[in-house]
Amino acid sequence: MAVFTEDTVFRGSNGMIYTVTLNPALDKEYHVAELSLNTVMRAAAVKEDYGGKGFNIARLLTTWGADCTALGLVGGHTGEILSSGLEKSGIAANFTHISGETRTNISIVSDHEAGYFKVNEPGPRVLEVEIETLLHLIKSLVKPDDWWILAGSLPPGVEPDIYARMIHLIQNRKGRAVLDSSGEAFKLGCRAAPFLIKPNTEEFIQFSEMEGREEVLDIEGMIKQLHTVGVKNIILSGGKEKAICSNGTQMWVGIPPKIEEKNPIGAGDAMLAAAVYSLSRNEPLQDAFMWGMAAGSAAAGLSGTRMPARPEVEKLIKKVMIREK
């Protein structure tokens, strides 16, 4: 196992890291005294956050000092709120503006009882010309050795092959594409041979079913199949139980450290962000896997959806258990 020090791990980056979020959201959380149906609930407090896997990832990378820019589709007044909010947070962005209104997701929670109400909008319908504008922007930015993290769901009107198109565009120009999605977009993206994918267990099962393997899930068999279709590296997150990493030649099983879990939402984003951060500094995949597991655990131990600071992750990395399978 590698020995980590400030000098050996966190040295200068070899390229920019970009995140792409196609269906971002303004997340609004209303806090009420109690949850009730068929009555007016009055909010004691309202919290706003800028939702999207790519934004979470960019937040961690920026906090850790990486050269990172967030790309994506934003529109309308809500898109302006989201753009200005990210800017105030210190996250560099280069958005493609669309005619539709960026979606708003609503949560209603009580500080005094369990349960919640949550409503997610589907997102604005995106026109093909707007997608082409984004693809043209990506084409103009891609340079060899840059990292591109393509993450999250698709808004209405976007064809499921969009991530596959982006992967071909990026890797034909010697960039490295990283995919974290689900469903048909994930399946088609895998067949475009990305450098790295990070599915969770649920997304992995979806892929298995799409491939006609509805019987007992054969994790190792599916990993081998994904390598066969062209995926170069795989990090499979399995929550607090274990994770698996493979480069097609070697496979590792990792057990994350035990923590007091407060909010697992965003843990997968932290895992991927830390792994790419490590890889962008020429660390081997095995070490990036360890950093990813430590970051995911650190994120799950935090209240809300904030990303962990580097010292919080450093405290946990020595507690990560990893073995070659």
Image: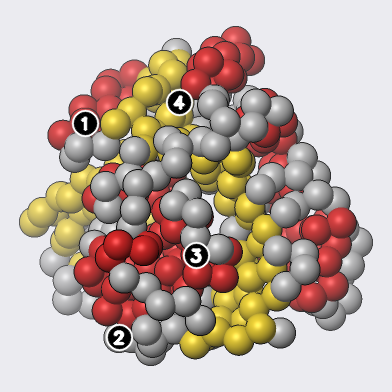
Asked if the residues shown at circle 3 and circle 1 are in contact, with their CB atoms under 8 angstroms apart, the answer is no
Q: How many marks?
A: 4
Q: Quadrant of residue 284?
A: bottom right
Residue at which label 4 appears: 73
Residue placed at 45% from the left, 29% from the top? 72
Label 1 crowd (10 A; few <14 / some 14-19 / many >=20): few
Residue 148 vertical placement versus 275 (above, below): above
Cα separation between marks 2 and 3: 23 Å
Residue at which label 1 appears: 87
- Circle nearer the N terminus (2, 3): 2
Q: Residue 260 carries which label?
A: 2
- Expressed as whole percent of the image width and height from the top left, the position of residue 194 reads 69, 45
In this view, which residue lies farthest toward the left? Answer: 44
Residue 107 visible to an observer of this rendering: no
- Circle nearer the N terminus (2, 4): 4
Asked if the residues shown at circle 1 and circle 2 are in contact, with their CB atoms under 8 angstroms apart, the answer is no
Please tell me which residue lies in front, 317 or 270.
317
Label 2 crowd (10 A; few <14 / some 14-19 / many >=20): few
Give the residue type that dot 4 points to. Leu
- Circle nearer the N terminus (4, 3): 4
> Which element type, helix, strand or loop, lies under badge 2?
loop
> Which element type, helix, strand or loop, lies under badge 4?
strand
